[in-house]
Image: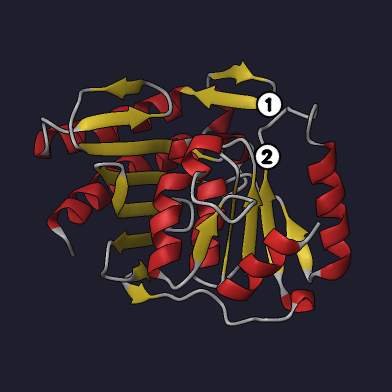
């Protein structure tokens, strides 16, 4: 394992211990709102602090871009962090959420960790070295026919204005595919594309910390990720399509 990836795994597991302890007594959580249906808890903040502490001990000069504490430092090396992607799931005791840590070097993702502490599933990837789930190599699915595709999707919580066309597309996709899933954790769903649990994924209005680790996992697993028009500016727009090559082609062309 790459030394930088090893540190990221250590950071993710440190955060996972905090999250697992909190999950034992969810009724005591202090929960705040950043926006409509956009939750934050003291556990998000504590987990993020633990991640940053581990990373900064190893790499004090590296920059940080984190969901809760924002951006700090200037460096060609930037850690992109989401301490709990799927906070609404977490506070309901629904075990579909993940810690996401990615390292961008000059804007390009080189290392990625996605860790679900509820299931102990650990997804990792290093640029050019493949993608792994619990140390076993993973690949995107080989399904090639639309009626076989299981497709995940996401758009910002609590937002409905301007998304009518997306809702219509999702409804139409339920009739042409094996099914649509909105699970509440974008980065974990992207990891599921990487390991073949999902064949494709559509997301809209997301942030870099929702996407960064998933981008590398998918590419290293033989998949593709673009914006809805087939271009590469999804980090700027927050709108992306991912999948195995056949699923991606279908989802981009589907109107």
- Label 2's element? loop
Q: Position of residue 209 (x, y in %)?
A: 43, 38
- Nearer mark to the viewer, of 1 and 2: 2
Instruction: Say which residue label 2 marks.
Output: 155
Q: Position of residue 63 (x, y in %)?
A: 22, 30
Image quarter for residue 249? bottom right
Q: Identify the residue at image location x=40%, y=50%.
A: 213
Query: Is residue 242 among what the camera can see?
Result: yes
Instruction: Say which residue label 1 marks.
Output: 37
Residue 237 position (above or below residue 131): above
Q: Identify the residue at image location x=42%, y=75%.
A: 138
Q: Nearer the viewer, residue 182 or 134?
A: 182
Q: How is the image coloured?
A: secondary structure
Q: Nearer the viewer, residue 58 or 210?
A: 210
Q: Residues within 10 Å of mark 1 (few under 14, many from 20)?
A: some
Query: Which callout, 1 or 2, points at the residue further toward the start of the chain?
Result: 1
Residue 32 position (above or below residue 63): above
Image side of residue 59 versus residue 92, left or right? left
Query: Is residue 24 among what the camera can see?
Result: no
Per the rendering, the mark at residue 169 is none
Q: Quadrant of the C terminus?
A: bottom right
Q: CA distance from mark 1 to mark 2?
A: 12 Å
Q: Identify the residue at image location x=52%, y=58%.
A: 225
Q: Nearer the viewer, residue 126 or 43?
A: 126
Q: Nearer the viewer, residue 16 or 159?
A: 159
Image quarter for residue 206? top right
Q: Identify the residue at image location x=50%, y=64%.
A: 224
- Label 1's element? loop
Image quarter for residue 93? top right
Q: Position of residue 49 (x, y in %)?
A: 30, 27
Residue 180 position (above or below residue 17): below
Q: How many numbered callouts?
A: 2
């Amino acid at each position: 394992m790459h030394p930088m990836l090893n540190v990221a795994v250590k950071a993710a597991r440190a955060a996972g211990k905090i999250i697992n302890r909190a999950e034992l007594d969810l009724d005591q959580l202090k929960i705040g709102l950043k926006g409509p249906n956009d939750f934050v808890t003291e556990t998000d903040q504590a987990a993020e602090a633990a991640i940053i502490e581990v990373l900064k001990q190893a790499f004090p000069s590296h920059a940080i871009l984190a969901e809760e504490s924002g951006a700090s430092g200037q460096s060609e090396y930037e850690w992109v962090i989401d301490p709990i992607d799927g906070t609404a799931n977490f506070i309901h005791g629904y075990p579909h959420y993940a810690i996401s840590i990615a390292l961008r070097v000059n804007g390009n993702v080189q290392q990625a960790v996605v860790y679900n502490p509820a299931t102990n599933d650990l997804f990792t990837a290093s640029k050019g070295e493949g993608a792994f789930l619990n140390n076993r190599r993973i690949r995107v699915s080989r399904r090639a026919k639309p009626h076989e595709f299981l497709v995940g999707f996401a758009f910002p919580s609590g937002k409905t204005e301007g998304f009518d066309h997306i809702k219509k597309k999702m409804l139409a996709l339920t009739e042409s595919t094996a099914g649509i899933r909105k699970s509440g954790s974008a980065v974990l769903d992207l990891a599921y594309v990487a390991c073949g649990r999902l064949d494709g994924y559509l997301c809209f209005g997301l942030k870099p910390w929702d996407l960064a680790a998933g981008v590398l996992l998918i590419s290293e697993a033989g998949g593709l990720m673009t914006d809805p028009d087939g271009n590469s500016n999804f980090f700027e727009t927050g709108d992306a399509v991912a999948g195995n090559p056949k699923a991606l082609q279908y989802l981009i062309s589907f109107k």
